[in-house]
Image: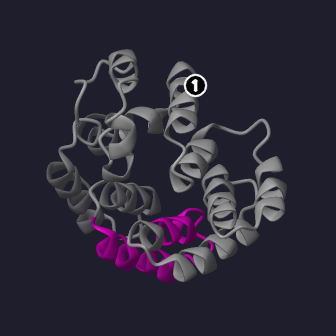
Amino acid sequence: MYAGCYLSPLGRFEEALQQTERVIAQDPLNMLCRGRQVRILILAEMYERAIVESQKSLEFDERHISAHSMIALAHFFQGKLPEAREWAEEAFRRTPLNSLAAGLLAGLLKQSGETEHAKKVLTTLRGMVSLGMIVYHVVCSEIDAAIDWYEQAIEQRHPYAAEWASGGFLRPLRSSPRWAKLAGMMNLPETG
C-alpha cells in the first residue's frame, strides 16, 4: 500500500519498486504485490521489465486478471502496436468486464480504423469505473476527454487516480493547463 498509494503518486518509483521487491522476496506467490509491482513498472516507463514480470505472474497463474492487459500496455507504450493488440484481445477475451482491458482494446481498434468494433467494445464499459475510459482516450491521444474521465475518477475516489498521477504515459495530461486542478483535488504537486 505504501508503494502504490504514497510513493507512486509522488513519482518515487525506485523506492516503490524496492518496497514491492522486499515483499515478493518474502512471499513470491503474492499476486497482489506482483500486480502492484507491474503497475509501478508501467508508470515508471520500464516496459520491458513490466513484460517480464507480467509473464512471471502468468507462470504462477495463467488466469492472472491484469497480466495480459499490462503486457498489452507495455507493448503499446513501446510503439509495438501488433503485439499490443494481440495481448489486448486476449485480455479482453479472458476478462471482458475488466475496464482496463476493454478501454485499451477499444483504443487500439479505433487507432487502427476499426471504429464500429471499437464502439462495440466500449459498450461493455457502461457503468464501470473510469479507468477504461481514461486508457481509451490516452491511447487515442484525446487529452481533454482523458482529463474529464480522470477528474471523474478522482471525484469517485478511485485509488488508481492517485497511484497513476505521476505515470510517464500521463505526461500529456500533466502538460495540460487543466492538470493543476486535478493535482489539487489529489493534494499532489501540480507537476510530477
Image point (32%, 21%), residue name: 180
Relative height, residue 89 to residue 66 (above, below):
below
Relative height, residue 64 to residue 151 (above, below):
below
Residue 95 belongs to the span the image colors magenta = no
**Percent position of residue 114, x then y:** 76, 67
Residue 59 belongs to the span the image colors magenta = yes
Q: Which residues are magenta?
A: 46-73
**Percent position of residue 150, x then y:** 51, 32
What residue sits right under mark 1 in the picture?
A: 152
From the image, give the main secondary structure of the stretch colored magenta. Answer: helix
- In front: 63, or 130? 130
**Percent position of residue 71, x then y:** 48, 72
Quadrant hosting residue 106? bottom right
- In front: 186, or 24? 186
**Percent position of residue 190, x then y:** 25, 24
Q: Quadrant of the C terminus?
A: top left
Quadrant hosting residue 127? top right
SS class, disc 1: helix
Q: How many marks?
A: 1
Horizontal side of 63 relative to 55 (left or right) equals right
Horizontal side of 121 relative to 20 (left or right) equals right
Q: Quadrant of the N terminus?
A: top left
Q: Amino acid at mark 1?
A: Gln
Quadrant hosting residue 18? bottom left
Image point (36%, 70%), residue name: 50
